[in-house]
Image (spheres, rainbow, N blue to C red):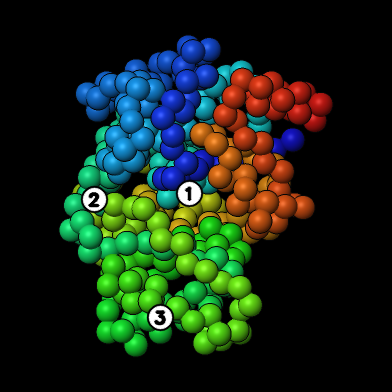
């Protein structure tokens, strides 16, 4: 049986995540220590003892997620040795996918995601940008909603940032444009007249994955151009193109571009479906990715979450029976 490694993004973090890995597996403990050394930051203390607010700071969230995701996939591969054909990561999760594939080194990736978090945080003054989830609209309706809001209000930019699953798209941009949309949201005026649609403001520190992130993208171009990208052991389905990529130069460029571009997650997962890659393991805390895959095509995709020792044992049984 072939497997795809799937890595969650920001929003999946929680204090104490990965503790089961650290307490039970040497390779996980080493991952925490290696990451801490790379940043001169005690990741164990941040993740296990830090507050939710500490962990929610973008410059902390991104290294924390990379650490736990990398620890998860290292334990998975050492303990169960599944046959891996591809990987994909949601936003920051793409770094973990590249580490898993051996394209970039873990310690360098750790420094890069710390820089990414700082660059994204400083790209826009606090309060000037935001993000909102839109439920119940298709992708074209969301695009129309953003374009209409900018045109009618005179505020901008505003654009789709995360295509998470059918009917769940996050938009990002100017806080003024988002506030205008919130106050003038009339689903009946949207082409196709959706019966149900709603806006859910997100608590974020910056407007990620939109053109307001261009300054962060340019900073990351400098960081990632200085990093070595190797040919990966398996292809990565990248956020920027929603296609499986394996050329080091392409992997680097797409990783740079995703900072200010939308995360094409739905499209990426449908591309994996086209390739016949149905079986996935969510390498990280929680089951956000599993939930999204269920909405994208629950009949085709079979995703195992890996957040507890019991999850690992269940997956072991599944792999043994398949072999």
Camera-side mark, 2 or 1: 2
Camera-side mark, 2 or 3: 3
Instruction: For residue 85, say whether it is visible.
Output: no
Real-space Cα distance between discs 2 and 1? 18 Å
Q: Secondary structure at mark 2?
A: helix
Camera-side mark, 3 or 1: 3
269 with respect to 64 (left or right): right
Name the residue beneath numbered marker 2: 121
242 with respect to 29 (left or right): right
Rendering coords of residue 66 (x, y %): 40, 34
Instruction: For residue 278, say whether it is visible.
Output: yes
Determine the residue positioned at 52% across, 87% down: 189
123 with respect to 100 (left or right): left
Q: Of residues 234 and 38, which is closer to you in this image?
A: 38
Name the residue beneath numbered marker 1: 90
Q: Of residues 189 and 275, which is closer to you in this image?
A: 189
Rendering coords of residue 77 (x, y %): 58, 24
Establish if 222 lies above or below 68. below
| The C terminus: image quadrant | top right
Q: In terms of image quadrants, where is residue 84?
A: top right
Q: How many marks?
A: 3
If you read the primary sequence from the N terminus, does the residue marked by circle 2 or circle 3 appear first? 2
């Amino acid at each position: 049986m072939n497997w795809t490694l799937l890595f969650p993004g920001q929003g999946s973090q929680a204090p104490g995540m990965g503790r089961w890995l650290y307490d039970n597996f040497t390779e996980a403990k080493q991952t925490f220590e290696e990451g801490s050394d790379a940043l001169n930051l005690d990741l164990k203390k941040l993740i296990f003892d830090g507050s939710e607010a500490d962990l929610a700071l973008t410059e902390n969230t991104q290294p924390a997620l990379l650490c736990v995701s990398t620890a998860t996939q290292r334990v998975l591969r050492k303990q169960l040795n599944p046959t891996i054909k591809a990987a994909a990561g949601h936003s920051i999760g793409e770094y973990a996918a590249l580490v898993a594939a051996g394209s970039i080194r873990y310690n360098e990736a750790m420094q890069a995601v710390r820089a990414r978090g700082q660059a994204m945080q400083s790209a826009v003054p606090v309060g000037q940008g935001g993000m909102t989830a839109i439920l119940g609209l298709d992708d074209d309706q969301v695009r129309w909603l953003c374009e209409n809001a900018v045109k009618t209000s005179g505020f901008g930019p505003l654009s789709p940032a995360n295509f998470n699953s059918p009917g769940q798209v996050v938009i990002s941009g100017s806080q003024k444009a988002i506030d205008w949309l919130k106050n003038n949201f009339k689903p009946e005026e949207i082409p196709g007249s959706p019966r149900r649609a709603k806006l859910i403001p997100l608590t974020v520190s910056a407007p990620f994955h939109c053109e307001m992130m261009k300054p962060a993208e340019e900073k990351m171009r400098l960081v990632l151009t200085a990093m070595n990208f190797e040919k990966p052991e398996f292809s990565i389905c990248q956020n920027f193109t929603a296609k499986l990529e394996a050329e080091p130069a392409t992997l680097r460029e797409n990783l740079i571009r995703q900072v200010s571009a939308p995360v094409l997650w739905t499209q990426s997962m449908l591309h994996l479906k086209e390739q016949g890659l149905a079986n996935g393991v969510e390498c990280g805390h929680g089951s956000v990715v599993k939930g999204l895959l269920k909405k994208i095509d629950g009949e085709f995709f079979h995703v195992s979450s890996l957040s507890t020792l019991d999850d690992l044992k269940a997956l072991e049984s599944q792999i043994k029976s398949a072999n």
